[in-house]
Image: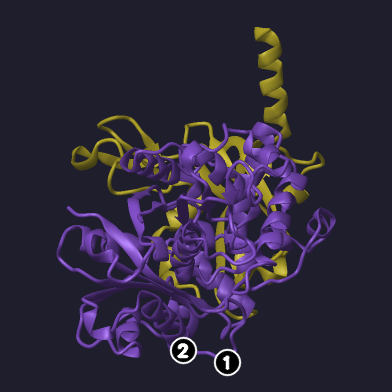
Amino acid sequence: MEKSPADLWRHVKSRYFLLGSVCENCGTKYFPPRVVCRKCGRNTKMKPYKFNGTGEIYSFTTIRAPADEFEEQAPYTVGLIKLDEGPIIEGHILTDESNEPIKIGTRVKVAFRKMYKEGNEGLIYYHYKFVPAPEQQKKQEKSKQKRA
Amino acid sequence: MRDVAIIGVGLTKFGERWDSSIKELMAEAGLAALQDANITSKDINAIYGGSMTPGRFIGQEHVAALMADQLGLGNIPATRVENACASGGSALRQGYMAVASGIHDIVVVGGVEKMTDVSTSEATTALGGAGDQEWELFQGITFPGLYALMARRHMHDYGTTEEQLAAVAVKNHANAYKNKYAQFHKLITIDEVLNSKKVADPLKLLDCSPITDGAAAVVLAPLEIAKKYNDTPIKIAASEQASDTLRLADRESITSIKAARISAENAYRHAGVTPKDIDVAEVHDCFTIAEIIAMEDLGFFKKGEAAKAIEEGRTQINGDVSVNTSGGLKGCGHPVGATGIKQAVEITWQLRGEAEGRQVDGAEIGLTHNVGGSGATAVVHVLKRAD
């Protein structure tokens, strides 16, 4: 099934800049943005919230049997990233941009990349992706050592 | 509210059925169920049909009406039920509610999926609709990819190994070998699973259920009149369902399917049984990891202990609990909308003592567990002999 440009466009701020939402009634943060707060229901007071883009790997997998538009990229690594602000979100992990093999717990940060293109003449879809962030790993380990 | 029984069941051979269109598959299963119930078309009051996405597989919607038409059921109400891979189980619950409430007396519930008219890649894309379109499939996270994320976390949290995943596939192929309706009649080994083509690490080809054509049907009646039709009516002692977030990322845990836990707890309470009382179970092994997680969600084993128990053979036929005697989704095949109904057919045969070649000794209480997507829907039924 063909991708709809409208599907990309309507959430471009979320797909490019990690714009989510926060319910001002209870403080819960959400990515992607949503209309109704799960906790507050009809007392929802949803406002935009931009995430920092840092977090750690919660799980990951390398997909070798690709989805339709992703044949050229296969194999590619995707993961669930636990953002520092709380929510867990899906994203590609750019393992090529790091020397260390990734594992659960590896610190990552967000980057702006191409997702795929419609042939040589069609649209190019961009998206957030994640790159391993070793400098954050070192910072985290240092602060763990200090506390110990 | 009155008790409901299964008085007839029917199944098609599962597999790549080039010879049969969706109409022939429906008719084959439906006819077998009507004959098994020894009932005529004019006695049927309503039909519920489960099918996940016939629109995307063959461009055909409106399939419950089609079922009524193919079986010559007249002008009865016909309703399609869709909950991704839990379409069949969900349809069964709708049929159960219709009879239990007294609104209808005799109801047929069918499930069907015709998947092989499209390429594997098109089928995979269609199946991706069971997850979140905008954030999972849009980013190329396939259905096996989602379960691979669950598997990797389960391995991290509990030490589950790839060999233990493989043990599920080996067991289910061994069971399917004895089931004439199953897609696969091929015994496999742990090594063959480990060496099969990688799909989404750690899942390999033989960790994944196949693409299958097939249909299944059951006939439901109030228990109080069931003996008119069948000497061994099977009582639906519980029919429970729950939902959860669409996106895997939104769940409280990715190593447990909360909708399945809730459905199971409610089902055991409603049926007045505990996991220890279940003799035979058909669970949703869309991927090997799913069966391991199911065994924990259903309370058969403690969290983190199911993989080892399966590896030790405790869930083989006549083990502590006999699991997926039909071969499960992996061995018997997974025509998506049909699976939830097929599970009820298999348990019915087991409880009646009619499961040729794979009979569990003295089976009296059975369970079916049907999951949609990565866990946004789960349906659990408990079935008991009622003779």
Q: Earlier in the sequence, mark 2 or mark 1?
A: 1
Marks 2, 1 in one chain:
yes
**Residue at 77 percent of width and 64 percent of height:** B187
Residue B335 in percent (x, y) is at: 52, 72
Residue A112 in percent (x, y) is at: 59, 52
Which residue has dot 2 on it? B24
Q: Is residue B371 left or right of residue A110?
A: left
Query: Does the rendering let one see residue A63?
Result: no
Which residue is at the front of the view, B98 or A65? B98
Q: Is residue B342 left or right of residue B195?
A: left
Residue B319 in percent (x, y) is at: 64, 45
Q: Mark on residue B19?
A: 1
Host chain of mark 1: B
Chain identifier of the yellow chain = A
Quadrant in which the C terminus of chain B is drawn: bottom left
Cβ atoms at labels 2 and 1 below 8 Å apart: yes
Chain identifier of the purple chain = B
Quadrant in the picture for residue A45: top left
Q: Is residue B194 left or right of residue B123?
A: right
Mark 1 secondary-structure assignment? loop
Host chain of mark 2: B
